[in-house]
Structures are given as structure tokens and as C-alpha cells.
Image (spheres, rainbow, N blue to C red):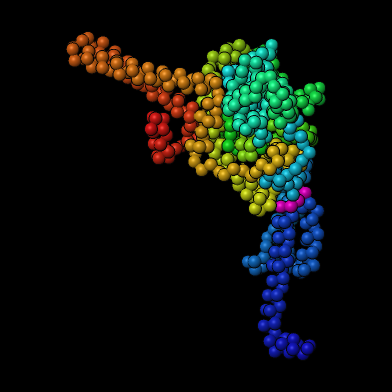
Amino acid sequence: TLSRPILASVLRPHFLTRRLRRLSQVSHSRAFADVSVRMMSLTRAAPTSLATAVPSLRQKSSRRASPKNAVSRPGAKRGASFVTASAMTPGSTKSTCSVGLGVTTARRGSHLVPTAVAEPPVSSTASSSGDTKSEFDWHNQWYPVAFLADLDDASPLTFTLLGEPLVFWRDPTAKELTYRCTADRCPHRLVPLSEGRVNEKGEIECGYHGWSFDGKDGKCTNIPQLPKPSTALDTALSSPRSCVTPYPTQVAQGMLWVLPINALKSDAAERPALPLIPELDNPDCVVQDIFRDLPMDYATLLENVMDVSHVPFTHHNSVGKRENATPVVLEMEGPLTKNGFVGIWKEGPRNGKYGSQFTEFKAPSLMRHTLKTKEFTTLTVVYAVPTTPGRCRLMARFPFIFGSPIPRTIFKIVPRWWSHLSQNAILEDDQIFLHKQERVIELQSSVHKLSYAQACYMPTKADTYVGAFRKWVADIGGDPAWPKGMVQALPPATTTNSALLDRFHAHTKNCKSCSVAMGNLVKIRKVLRVVSLIALVAAAAAFARSVSPKISMGLAVLAAATALAREVMGGWVQKMKVGPYPPPRRPPSMMESALESARLGGA
């Protein structure tokens, strides 16, 4: 057996030498390919172990291939892998890990790399597909459901919270401002109580068969189909099956709040405190409010409003400018806890013009940015209220505290419905791609089994808050406590922009100021149409009868002015129905411009 290789080396030395060299190159390529694969799996699964794991991999690869070939072979085959990886730790200035043909050194801007690179924002096994469980009590939390300015005391309000339909109504018999809340389901035939009315006793009365319920304890007080008095009526009214579940409510800072726990099983002394904004109690504070039902998950909304670095780009030409964008360095102040986190942007917006900006996430649904200067204090407050999987209600507040009374007066003069037009437009700047983004993330989780940290590449400190929030979701909060058996996957994607930009069903019909303004605008437009036609006919008649040119010209101008005003108001009415597209960050195409003009024209 030894004679054959000896004979081959004697008879064909050049062939054997080339063969051995080729085998050496192949083993070199395989060794580095193996290191590359292991490095990729390590960076996906646990970036924190990268710095300690790479030296052992380097030792294994050196045992497989010659050190000379593994490090300095410029003539390696095309299949050889080149791998460079670095793991930054807090306070480090140079990378400590290199594999392959080069060495990584500290680069410009390395101080902008967040600690999340070394400490992933979520665990490698976390999932966002709806199967995460946690010990966080989603029900023992106060949630805002509506602004008091939008409530109609004459009719019930329905709202879905954590997948459960609820009905709210004002109790006219209470001495103080009091709202009642029960499950929005009549125990008789399971129709929604919100389709009924509030009777003279301050009870909710079912619109199907007239059964009535007391909002304080949920007991049924009247069944018209049974005679009074009778044993049958007493038996039915005393049965637990005739009751509805009551829920505690509060009114504070201009909002209606609900605690989604059975009021009969909840001790008032042990209930949590309301997540209020202390600045709103300042007498010099003026605030603009808006709500909107959004086609996205509550977590997608919170992640978006925490992200301050998207403003110059997403909201270009609305509330931001691309040319004002700068590197954003966000830092945590203290640890991430069950109750949330606090962070700081030391430089702050506008290149530090207004000082540092502070951010607080108060679990599970409150996020606030605070910016204080000598002249004013401004806040961005967002409550992301989970309604059903893939949908939430945004309750946004924009408090301003001015030292001068002039800005406060200007803010108070602006009609609420007018401010809602611009605020809705800002919300729509990113509404379409957020709706699509969360479905891509769900696909990465359910199909590719990737956590959020594995699916998204976030190498800058601008994503510090997003990473911390996603870590809270993965390790602490989990998914909202949806009813048992409810499908937790996202609903099918909305395919048309007009449906995603719908304002009428998402806001206008439930906003008192906008719905009233819309009705008034429609009435005014009808009057203007009549005035315009009369003025036009009168101008033509005056011209035909050779009346003074000033009169005929004045009538013609009146007709044109009323027609123009009618068209402008028509544009406002259309904007209360559907938002414009495309957003201001990019110019519209010729077709988009034509379609938008046709839409505003009432086509």
C-alpha cells in the first residue's frame, strides 16, 4: 500500500505537488467557511457571547488549516471566506475580535453605537407572533378610552379594550360627573347594550327587549317580558346569569378612564394610580388633544413615537426637515423595570437649541417626551390603548406651558377641529408603512423564527429606546392579555391607501368637534351654492340691462368668491373623510397629483 504513493511521487512529482497544494487550499476554504457559518449563528443567537466565542473558533480553525495558509495567503481561492466581526462593550474604543484576512479598528462615529450591540434588546428566544406569556397584569391597569370633550351624554359609547367590548354612559342621577361601564353584551340574547339607551333611572336599557341594568353592580333591574310583581321576575332578577360585568371608571384630566377588572372583585383601595401628566394641572398649561383608531398594533405605535430620529425624514415638510437631521445619541437613565424606563437625549432636537429632551415609558401604554426651556415647556404624550390584535387607539396630548400669555391665547383661539386636520396629516405620514412593517416582522417571527432583535438591524444609539421597549415586551410584558381563544395573529393587510388613510371612521365620526364642524360645513356649502347662483344670475341680468358696471362687477365678484369659498370648504370636508396621499416628504407623481385634485374636487 505504501508503494503506490511513493511510485506516484517518483513518476509524477509535479502532478502530486499541484494536487497537495489544491487540497491545502480546499481545507483552508472549508475551515474559514466553517468559521463564517459559526460566526453568523453566534451573532444571530447571542451577540454578547461574540467576543468570548471567536477566539475558540479561531483555535479550532487553526487546527484544521495551516496558520500560514489561514492568515496570509493572498492567492486563496475565490471560495475562501473573509470574516470580520466586532463586539462593542460600554466604554470600549476598539474592537477586540477579528477573524480572516483583516483586523477591525475603531471607526469614526463608534461612540454612536448603542450598548444594545453587545446586549441584545430582546432574548434570542423571544417571539412576537402572539405566543409570548408573561406575569405582567394587563388588566390591573387604567386605560383612557375617550376625551370628555368628545362624549355625548345623551347616548352610550362603545369601546373595545383588550378584545372585550365595553359600553360607557353618563349616569344623570349621580351628583358628580359619573360614567358607568359594563360589558357591552346583554345576557338575554347577547346583543350589544350600546345599541340601546340610558333610561330615566340612569341605567342602560337594551334596545332589543328592554332589559335594564344598573351600572354600579351590573344587576338586571327590569325584564318587561315578566309580570310585576311575580316570583318569576324576582327569581330572574336575582340570578347571576341576568347580570352584566361592571367595571370601575374615573374622570381625570379631561379623559374617561376604565380599569378592566370586575368592579365587584376589585378593592378600590388596592387599585393602581392613574398614569396622569402632572404638567396638565399647571394653570398656565394649554393642551391640544387628538385620538385616532389606528390599523396597527399598540407596540408598533409606541415604538414609532419613541423613535425621535425618524422625525426629520418621515415628517419632512410637515414637522421636520431632512437638512436638520443629526446623529441621535439616546441614553437610558436607570435600569429597565417592570414599570418601564426613563431615558435622555442630552443634545436634544435642533442641534441642542432647546436643551436636553427626556423620555419616559410607563408600562404598558404611556410614552412621553419632555422638553423644557426658559421660555416654554412642551410635551408629547401618547397613550397607546390596545383594542384588538393589530389595532389600537391613539390618545395623544400636546401640552404647552408658556411664560407669556400671548401664545396661550393663540392656542385657545384655534378651533379644535382645525388643529385635528393638521394633526391627522402628521399621523398619516408613517401610517402606511407601519401597517406593512409589522406584518413583515410577524412573518420573520412566525416563519423564520427570528426575534425582533434578530430580524431588525439596529446599530446606532438612536434605537436605544426601541431596543429597551422591545426588551420589555419580550422579557416582561409579553403580548396584551387578549381573551382566551381569540386569534392573536394580525388581521389581513389593508391593501388600499384610502382605507389606511380613512379619517371618517377612525376619527371624525367619534370626535364631537370634527363631526359638528363637518355637518356645519356641509350646510354652509349648500347656502353658498345658492348665493353663488343668485349672484351670478343677478350679475348677468344687470349687465344685460346696462345697469351700472360697478353693480354687475360686484355681483360677479360675489358669485366667484362664494364659489371659491364653497370649494375650499369642500376640500376641508374631504380631508375629514380621507387623508391625502402621498405624504409631504416626497413630491407627488403626475397621476397622484391628478387623483388628489379630483378627490378634493368631490369626484
**What residue is shown at x 57% (from left), y 12% (from top)?**
409
* 5 lies above or below 536: below
Q: Quadrant of residue 69?
A: bottom right
* 29 lies above or below 579: below
**What residue is shown at x 81% (from left), y 59% (from top)?**
56
Left-right relation of 79 to 525: right
* 395 lies above or below 433: above
**What residue is shown at x 78% (from left), y 88% (from top)?**
1
Along the viewing direction, whichever of 202 and 136 lies nearer the viewer: 202
Q: Magenta includes 94?
A: no
Q: How many marks?
A: 0
- Where residue 53 sits in the image (x, y, percent)? 79, 55
Q: Can residue 464 be seen in this view?
A: no
Along the viewing direction, whichever of 34 and 385 lies nearer the viewer: 385
**What residue is shown at x 69% (from left), y 38% (from top)?**
482
- Where residue 547 sits in the image (x, y, percent)? 20, 10
* 20 lies above or below 315: below
- Where residue 86 sits in the image (x, y, percent)? 73, 51
Left-right relation of 360 to 533: right
- Where residue 179 sits in the image (x, y, percent)? 67, 19
Along the viewing direction, whichever of 346 and 183 lies nearer the viewer: 183
Q: In which quarter of the image is the C terminus?
A: top left
Give the main secondary structure of the magenta stretch: helix
Q: Magenta includes 46?
A: yes
Q: Quadrant of residue 436?
A: top right
Q: In which quarter of the image is residue 80?
A: bottom right
> What residue range appears in magenta?
44-48
